[in-house]
Amino acid sequence: MKEKARQARAENRIIGLVPTMGALHEGHASLIARAKRECSPLCASIFVNPKQFGPNEDFAKYPRTFESDCEKMKRGRVEALFVPEAAEMYPKDFSTYVYVEGLSERLEGKSRPGHFRGVTTVVMKLLQIVQPHRAYFGRKDAQQARIIMQMAGDLNLDSEIVVCPIVREPDGLALSSRNVYLNPEQRKAATVLSRALEAAKKEMEAGSRDAPHLQDTLRRKLDSERLAAVDYAEIVDAESFEPVVRVNRACYIVLAVFIGKTRLIDNLYVEPKSSGSDELVFHL
Ligand code: AMP
């Protein structure tokens, strides 16, 4: 992979990278399509990164659909598919980690200790190996994208980090490789995440800017779903991921909710229409 990347760089080509854990869906396809428009050659990786899973998480049973992933990569005209083995990425004497302080401790980081350390370490390695000009991530994992941007800035990386919109099912559920864990009843219940975000959006459209009030709305909606158990439902500053009191700047409404044993996340990005404007623009 490094040899190929070096060659493409020498030819002054624009290398794109889409890192994935496989079990590809339309969310991944949207990153690939965007990257394809902007880069050549396009590289995608499939690596279920053991270091970002906690001891009681779903590493062993994470969906692995290599054959159909390859088909989808071909259809997306991915030129280089990088599928390293865990033993190659993390040999026995592996001992160097990348950790973004502060941001990695909140929300997802608090619920999943060690998760972001695993993510930033593997993304750093992938960026070192592929040396992409542009690397593409989904806003589905908003905190992850923010942390990777912080890492890229702090460590003066040469790769531009591109964040792409969330792709959803027609009923609002954000696409996720973990959605396959849901039985039909849970699948129906899982729409409560996007329904809660829609409810908060509606209130903001009607003029509400008070974060505690909006949070109540989220809670009420989420609690109304019998199969849902809320991990967190918060309104945070889009840069620091610290809680806000008023929605008068770029914010994320972030949710993590268990539906049965399956932990789902979703978010709504909201920002002022223009600087100083009270009007908001929503990215659901
Ligand atoms: P994963 O395979 O789950 O690690 O995801 C690989 C990349 O796809 C990450 O940058 C995710 O944020 C992104 N992604 C996952 N689901 C979606 C989605 N529904 N819409 C947009 N991007 C997504």
Image (cartoon, grey):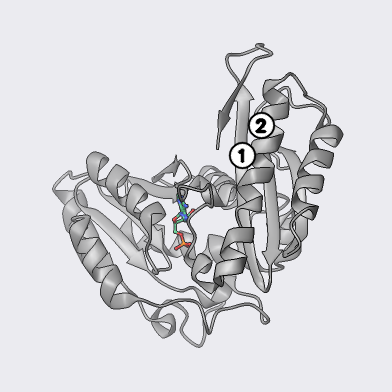
Question: Visible in this render: residue 247?
Answer: yes
> On screen, 64 above or below 166?
below
SS state under label 1: strand
Q: Quadrant of the C terminus?
A: top right
Q: Do the residues labelled 1 and 2 touch (CB within 8 Å)?
A: yes
- Residue marked by disc 2: 201
Q: Which amino acid does label 2 sit on?
A: Lys
In depth, the one of 69 and 242 nearer the eye is 69
Residue 147 screen position, x and y as percent: 59, 49
Tag 2 or tag 1, which sits nearer the N-term?
2
Within 10 Å of disc 2 (Cα), the crowding (few <14, some 14-19, many 20+) is: many
| Residue at the (17%, 43%) spot, across then down | 12
| Residue at the (52%, 45%) spot, across then down | 139
9 sits to left or right of 82 = left
Q: Quadrant of the N terminus?
A: bottom left
- Residue marked by disc 1: 268
Residue 11 screen position, x and y as percent: 13, 48
Residue 46 screen position, x and y as percent: 36, 69
Q: What residue type is labelled 1?
A: Leu
> On screen, 45 above or below 153?
below
Q: Mark 1 and ligand 1: say if the CB distance to the nearest ligand atom is below 8 Å.
A: no
239 sits to left or right of 19 = right
Q: Distance between the residues labelled 1 and 2?
A: 8 Å
Question: Visible in this render: residue 238?
Answer: no
